Amino acid sequence: MKFYIPMKSHKWGFKMHLLCDSDTHYLYNILFDPGKDGKKFIYFEENTSLGESIVLKLLSCVNDNKQRNIFFDGWYSSINLIKKLTEMGYMNTTILRSNAKDLPSKIKLEGYDNAYKDKILIQKYEDKKKIFFATNYKIDKEDLKNTYNIKNRGVDVFDQYLENSSIQRKTKKWYKKVFLFGIDAAIINSKIICELKEKRIYSTVLFKEKIIETIFEIYKKYNSNNDNFKTTNNKSYIPNRFRLILHNIGHIVNEKKRCKYCSKKTPYICKECNLHLHPECFTIYHNNNVYNKTNY
């Protein structure tokens, strides 16, 4: 499932296909690319290419009747895909590669800047290399390039949000990377919704800090009203990595003492026995030292 992409800074990685809003950059849908052996799970129909199938699968989550304009780059695009999206009621704008199928032959010649094929406008721009823009709705030819460049940034901006304070860590387990990506994406989507509701902009780091503070404030209220979360010494038992944060908002954490079973230090404590025990040592200790000595 790993891809080698030499143009990227991280040349080896997993490929995610995203559907994002052009204005808010909200993530609507994700399609995980399973690699060469899993391509059959992506194909939408028998007569569609891989790029067409990915676009159509991503759009399958859009169920409303609003008229939408879809922007995608040259890796996915084809004349056939534009026709299918037109039949489905979508407006769409894209870049076509110079070797794209069904591209009008005269548009490649000098002196021809645009051409029509099946009511699809194909506009040529020459910069460092020839670029072909295609759209299925009426737009000024001069505005076509600017519109595409502005509206096609939905996925790019979402990626920028992810990179600002990513929780990704080095790991050899591929599923951990995918799982952490999902958490990151959920946080960014929450941030976008919060910004729209409160009409203000948060930095990604600040928004994550607010989430953590809110979680601990809820825990603090629940802990103060629930005796099951207290030890006999009125001290809560919480993992060490949360000590500093919890201390700052008024929580008290047990001191580390040696586990009764393995003798290694732990902040966890058994409420009934008032003994320090690791969670993994809890069952073993009680089976050997408590239940075996009874008449059960």
Image: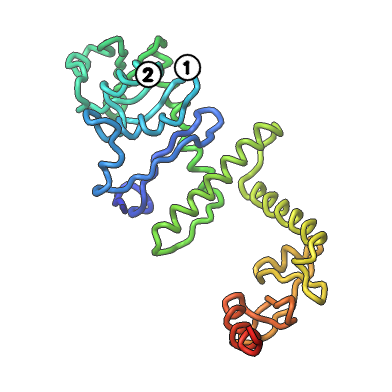
**Rendered residue at 46%/20% (across/down):** 68
In the image, 275: left or right of 262?
Answer: right
Image coords of residue 177 (percent x, y):
44, 56
Which quadrant of the view contains residue 74?
top left
Q: Is residue 38 above or below residue 44?
A: below
Under mark 2, the amino acid is Met
Q: In the image, residue 240 lies at what x, y percent?
A: 66, 71
Mark 2 surroundings: few (<14), some (14-19) or many (≥20) residues within 10 A: few
Q: Residue at x 27, y 47 (%)?
A: 38
Q: Residue 259, can we see it? A: no
What residue did someone put label 2 on?
88
Q: In the figure, residue 246 lies in which quadrant?
A: bottom right
Residue at the spot x=82%, y=72% of the render?
234
For residue 220, which numbered disc appears in the image? none
Q: Quick check: 269 left or right of 192?
A: right
Give the SS element for disc 2.
loop
User: Label 1 belongs to which residue?
Assistant: 67
Secondary structure of residue under mark 1: loop
Q: Amino acid at mark 1?
A: Gln
Percent coordinates x, y for residue 277 in the rendering = 65, 80
Quadrant of the image containing the C terminus? bottom right
State whether residue 269 is above or below residue 222: below
Q: Is residue 131 left or right of residue 185?
A: left
Within 10 Å of disc 1 (Cα), the crowding (few <14, some 14-19, many 20+) is: few
